[in-house]
Amino acid sequence: METYFIETWGCQMNVLDSQRLEGLLQQRGLRRVAHAEGADVAVLNTCSVREKAVHKVLSRLGELHGLRRENGRPGVVGLCGCVGEQEGARLLARSAGLDFVLGPGRVSQLPQVLDAVAQGRRTSVTGFPAGPDYDPDTIARGSSARQYITAIHGCDQHCTFCIVPTTRGHESSRTLAEIVAEVTGVVERGGKEVTLLGQTINAYRCPATGADFGDLLQVVGAVPGVWRVQFVTSHPRFFTRAMVEKIASVPSLGTYLHLPFQAGSDAVLKRMHRGYTRAGYLDLVAMIRTAMPRVTLSTDVIVGFPGETEDDFAATLDVVREVGFGQLYGFVFSPRPRTPAARYPGRIARAEAGIRLERLFDLQASIQLELNQAMVGRTVELLLDGPAKRGSALWQGRGADNRVVNVPGWNGIAAGELATVVITGATPHSLLGERREPVTRPA
């Protein structure tokens, strides 16, 4: 085995898991190649949040198996991530081209799994060990100025639509000292923006000191060299006034806060087992905006949840209008295996749910356009990510509010650098800016 390729689907946690897998492969002396079909070890790191995830995985495995046979390069194919945890050894039985399955709680066991495959054993390793399965020293972080760091693993909330407690395990917080040490190392190696990750990040509680998430942010924000601190994903039920005030006191904190509300109807929220009401959510938004007047809120919304009436959906649209989210991620309800909502009566027809989703997106597009147009003329500091598109003269970056800003390139422009730009134009989904030339003074 000399080469590898990792294909990543899903959320930021999967991106970080892929970096962990990559680090372990590099420790074995493997080098990355550009395509899965040409690699000695090809890994699919999967997501099971949406419907038909297993079907998509099996389709991709079949496609990859065919391409590798055509190339005369069978190699090793592995499947990791949440679909791996969800299906386990059943995937080995359903795909002849699959050599191993590795759950997200067993990433560190990749070397042993590869050894087993080399001995001719197809292997499935899933479940969650009692001890930690996270070694920051093995992560292949690359040169990106934006870095992810796990603060809390798993989820204990058991929302009725969500499979994450099954695929990611129970909540388990890392110690504050471990997280701060990792942040310090990332910054020393050139990281500028640090995003703390957790399925329910604000449920964090240090197992050694009892520090809560507000305490953690204050300490991380004070690490020398940190330009910006972000975090995802928060749950409305875990924010307290004291925590919000602590968070608001962090100077390096970004002005972007992801706060899923999922549905605007109390009846639907109760069936979802979300643990808050519409009024409680709106009160929390008001509290956050009082403490952080410049905050840009984003959210998640599910439409077509079983039993959702037109009035229920209208209540969701009302929340979107009232809050004015800077970004919104909307989804049609997807029944997931072993979740209560998969058995609920009152399933909404797919066509009707799709129409509701389009109505939601149309409303949000008009709100985002208005909010983005209000940015025209403002000066913002961006962290540059790279060319907006391959071969494009425009470069893309994000500021403290996580909005995408496209700017014309200039001599010496480089990914990972900070740039001050003036916003000159707006669309519903991005901003256009121009670099503000540095002020020069005569000698």
Image (cartoon, rainbow, N blue to C red):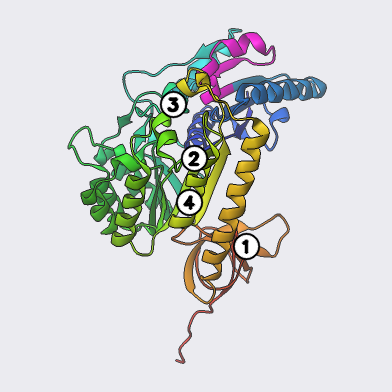
Which residue bears the numbered disc 1?
A: 395
Kindly report the distance in space between the C-alpha atoms of the residues bearing marks 4 and 2.
10 Å
Which residue bears the numbered disc 4?
A: 318
Question: What amino acid does circle 4 point to?
Answer: Asp
- Residue depth check, mark 4 versus mark 1: number of the one nearer the observer: 4
For label 4, count other residues whose C-alpha is less than 10 Å away and answer few (under 14), some (14-19) or many (20+): few
Give the camera-side residue of 227 and 112: 227
Position of residue 224 in the picture relative to residue 413 (left or right): left
Choose top left, top right, bottom left or bottom right for residue 50. Answer: top right
Position of residue 162 in the picture relative to residue 66 (left or right): left
Residue 312: numbered disc: 2
Question: What amino acid does circle 1 point to?
Answer: Trp
- Residue depth check, mark 2 versus mark 3: number of the one nearer the observer: 2
- The picture places residue 412, in percent across and down from the top left corner, at 60, 68
Kindly report the distance in space between the C-alpha atoms of the residues bearing marks 2 and 3.
17 Å
Position of residue 306 in the picture relative to residue 292 (left or right): right
Question: What amino acid does circle 2 point to?
Answer: Asp
Q: Earlier in the sequence, mark 2 or mark 3?
A: 3
Residues in magenta? Answer: 79-102
SS class of the residue under badge 2?
Answer: helix
Point 28% across, 53% down: residue: 247
Residue 160: numbered disc: 3
Choose top left, top right, bottom left or bottom right for residue 288. Answer: bottom left
SS class of the residue under badge 3?
Answer: loop
Kindly report the distance in space between the C-alpha atoms of the residues bearing marks 4 and 3.
23 Å
